[in-house]
């Protein structure tokens, strides 16, 4: 029966990830670039965490939030890239239902948590620039911990709902996922049930989860810019603008990829477009984030120099 077929496929057969690359020379070259970008992301974020942990001058709210961002980027990249590489190099493209559910859970969790963490980071810069005297009270460690925990819990709640609903649908046809990892829209295309209501709910949820933090970010930086313009000190202006411009660059990267990926109606999405935007936010953004925050940051450069001196480099 239809029910028995869907149950048997659910527990006996694995999904097949069609992947991103073939075995052509051009694709193998692109695969090498992806591995290189992943290695840079792994090294950059790990080094960033090491510097923040090792230098007590970086034990501030701003760097605490940056360390959380690095952890999120490492989780996201580690969830996607190793399985993609193993499938291509081994020739076996299968992924179990449990591993597929884990990928969806972690990707959605990090995406939702990062969205709200960026809003928290914007509020932190607003408090530091606009209310410097009250900043230690506004952003004490208890407040920082609660705001960070809330960001993670939003992501966890969203991912639990998504995984539960996605795997409640029957999959009685092809189990070939036209993607290089398990992503919600790619799996919904395979379901033999009507998923249109859930897809509309996902779209509405993504609009709310993206736009609410974006309002906080825009409002915070509007106030920051107004305050910076009125600063009498040129050095103070430059320091504030350098820090805030780095954060805005990261916000632009995140929202650029995420809004293009998740704020589209299901009817306008294509597998090719989904794969392209997924590369952007699972590999390129984690690689660029630590670079953006380090290039013009004197405190990070000073901490790195201390580490290198300690190691005799």
Image: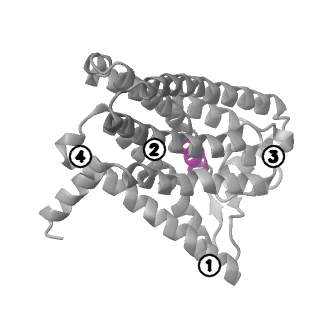
The residue where tag 3 is placed is 269
**Residue 12 appears in view:** yes
The residue where tag 4 is placed is 53
The reply to whether discs 3 and 4 touch (Cβ–Cβ < 8 Å) is no
Mark 2 or 1, nearer chain start? 1
Left or right: where 81 falls relative to 236: right
Query: Quick one: 11 or 264, which is closer to the camera?
Result: 264
**Residue 1 appears in view:** no
Query: In percent of the image, x 62 and y 30: which residue is there?
Result: 210
Query: In percent of the image, x 77 and y 33: which residue is there?
Result: 199
The residue where tag 1 is placed is 29
Is 106 a magenta residue?
yes
Mark 4 or 2, nearer chain start? 4
Instruction: State how many labels appear.
Output: 4
Distance from Cα at disc 3 to Cα at disc 4: 42 Å
Structure colour scheme: one colour
Q: Nearer the viewer, mark 3 or mark 4?
A: 4
- The x, y position of residue 121, in whole percent, is 43, 31
Query: Quick one: 175 or 268, which is closer to the camera?
Result: 268
- The x, y position of residue 191, in whole percent, is 80, 44
Q: Which residues are magenta?
A: 98-107
Disc 1 packing (10 Å; few <14; some 14–19; many ≥20): few
Q: SS class of the residue under badge 1?
A: helix
Q: Find residue 246 and name its label.
A: 2
Query: Quick one: 82 or 32, which is closer to the camera?
Result: 32
């Amino acid at each position: 029966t239809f029910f028995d077929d869907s149950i048997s496929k659910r527990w006996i057969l694995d999904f097949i990830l069609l992947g991103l690359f073939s075995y052509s020379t051009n694709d193998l070259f692109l695969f090498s670039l992806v591995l290189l970008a992943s290695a840079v992301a792994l090294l950059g974020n790990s080094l960033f965490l090491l510097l923040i942990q090792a230098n007590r001058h970086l034990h501030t709210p701003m760097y605490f939030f940056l360390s959380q961002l690095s952890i999120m980027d490492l989780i996201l990249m580690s969830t996607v890239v190793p399985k993609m590489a193993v499938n291509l190099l081994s020739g076996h493209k299968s992924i179990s239902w449990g591993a597929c559910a884990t990928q969806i859970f972690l990707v959605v969790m990090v995406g939702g948590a990062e969205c709200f963490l960026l809003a928290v980071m914007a509020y932190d810069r607003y408090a530091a620039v606009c209310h410097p005297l009250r900043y230690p009270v506004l952003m004490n460690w208890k407040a920082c911990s609660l705001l960070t925990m809330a960001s993670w819990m939003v992501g966890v709640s969203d991912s639990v709902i998504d995984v539960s609903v996605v795997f409640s649908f029957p999959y009685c046809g092809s189990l070939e996922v036209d993607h290089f990892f398990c992503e919600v829209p790619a799996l919904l295309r395979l379901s033999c049930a009507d998923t249109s209501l859930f897809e509309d709910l996902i779209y509405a949820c993504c609009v709310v989860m993206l736009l609410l933090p974006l309002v906080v970010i825009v409002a915070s930086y509007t106030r920051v810019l107004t305050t910076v313009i009125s600063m009498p000190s040129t050095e103070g202006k430059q320091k504030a603008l350098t820090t805030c411009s780095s954060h805005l660059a990261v916000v632009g990267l995140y929202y650029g990829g995420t809004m293009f990926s998740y704020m589209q109606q299901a009817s306008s999405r294509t597998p090719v477009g989904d794969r392209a935007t997924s590369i952007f936010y699972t590999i390129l953004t984690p690689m660029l984030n630590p670079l953006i925050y380090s290039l013009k940051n004197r405190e990070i450069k000073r901490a790195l120099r201390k580490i290198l001196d300690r190691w005799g480099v």
